[in-house]
Image (spheres, rainbow, N blue to C red):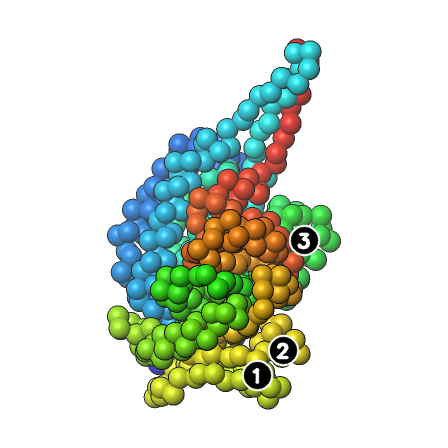
Amino acid sequence: MKNFASINPYTEEALKQYDFISSSELEEKLNSVHTHFETWKKKSFTERGEYFLKLSFLFRRDADKLAELASIEMGKLIHEAKAEVLKSVSACDFYATQSAQILKSHITEIENNNLIEIQYQPIGVVLGIFPWNFPYWQILRSVIPILMSGNTMLVKPAPNIPQCSIALQELINEAGLGDYVRTIFANNSQIENLIADERIKASTLTGSEKAGSIVASTSAKHIKKSVLELGGSDPFIILEDADLDACIPVAINSRFQNNGQSCIAAKRFIINKNIAEAFIQKIIDATKKLQMGNPLENDVNIGPIARKDLMEQLSKQVIDSVNLGAKLLFQSQQKTKQGYFFPPTILSNIKPEMPAYSQELFGPVMSLFVVENDREAIQLANDTQFGLGASVWSKNLYRAKEIAEQIESGQVFINRLVRSDVRFPFGGIKHSGFGRELGEFGLKEFCNIKSIITQG
């Protein structure tokens, strides 16, 4: 039975299919990364970094080919796909050059010549489980720091992007890292068994709440660490003194980038009543200009949803919300002959009982809320099970920072697009997960932070 299926969401054409990995091949790959851990952990940071500097070169070399493959396999706009590839390069370069300093052991005198040395040591094989919406960046932002800290990995990609995953593994192999990172097309039962296997020391997952709950509970059962980056319903708070000329283009980009399929996309737009009319009119006018179509064409703004079932789920969420009283302020009437398209949509009059209020809408749907004051904006922003990212828009930076400090999320951006960046930690709270990727904290997540105390 074929279970990893590559289907072009624009043409709806079945491209390639792959079987789940066999038990014997899975055992071979697990044993390989487990065995090679002993060699890898002894390499210096400089030696490890050389591998990733080579991988950086290979990504730049193959950027156009990788971008086109992502557009074909999951519908990402070609220019956004190219940007993702180059962002992956930044992770290679950063960790290759900065890991030695970040993980440098340090010694402190505590009392009477007693010394304490803090060391960051690798723990072994880490299992990574990854989504489809950023087929290169999501994997590499985890693989690179985990390996630079001395660990090895098994990588389980999403079932609808097998060709991107194979292309990524081929470049990993060409960079000389094939003994230390292996891709597995595993099923859920195999993943559960892997987490239980004593050779797997920890796991990391980017994906849905349901998947995160299973991985976290299974890891806890076997007393193993896990890091989870799950869904988001990020608030985009617009105060009455916001610069709309700067705000509107970012609002459009934040909600509709990656065809609306991003965990840290702005999904709930919380608008002060004094600026609501102007903001709503401008955002409708800007949304009307978005062009749906072939993601390989440079003038297209909205490509297809990555899978048919995801398109149908989003459609149901919107229909159910409207049936419960949500107002359909705008929905594009553009027609496409084929593809898993959902038209750019703007909803208002959203109440707590509606899917648009409490659920993550993973697609090009914008939810608008009008509030009386800052207190109400903060209350609404925090009235969610998610806590991944947020942004606040105001010319008064002191006021914006006061609000930012009260938002329950892993990161808040003031007058800027919420994004991940290799230089600072990324992750959420509540149902958006726990643990951190990227930056100094992401590099240390899968280290044994060891204290050695010496009597002077």
Q: CA distance from mark 1 to mark 2?
A: 7 Å
- Is 385 in front, or is 305? 385
The residue at the point 35 percent across, 86 percent down is 334
User: Residue 165, relative to residue 291: is it above or below?
Assistant: above
Give the amino acid type for the residue marked by disc 1 in the picture.
Ala
Whole-percent x, y for residue 248 in the image: 39, 67
Q: Which structural element holds mark 1?
A: loop
The residue singled out by tag 1 in the image is: 326
Counting residues from the start of the chain, the first of labels 3 and 1 encountered is 3
The residue at the point 63 percent across, 78 percent down is 351
The residue singled out by tag 3 in the image is: 219
For disc 1, the neighbor class at 10 Å (few under 14, some 14 to 19, many from 20) is: many
Whole-percent x, y for residue 378 in the image: 60, 61
The residue singled out by tag 2 in the image is: 351
Does residue 107 appear in the picture of this structure? yes
Q: Which structural element holds mark 3?
A: helix
Q: Do the numbered discs 3 and 1 sit on residues whose CB atoms are within 8 Å?
A: no
Q: Seen in the image, is 351 located left or right of residue 300?
A: right
Give the amino acid type for the residue marked by disc 2 in the picture.
Lys
Question: Which-is-in-front pick, marks 2 and 3?
Answer: 2
Q: CA distance from mark 3 to mark 1?
A: 40 Å
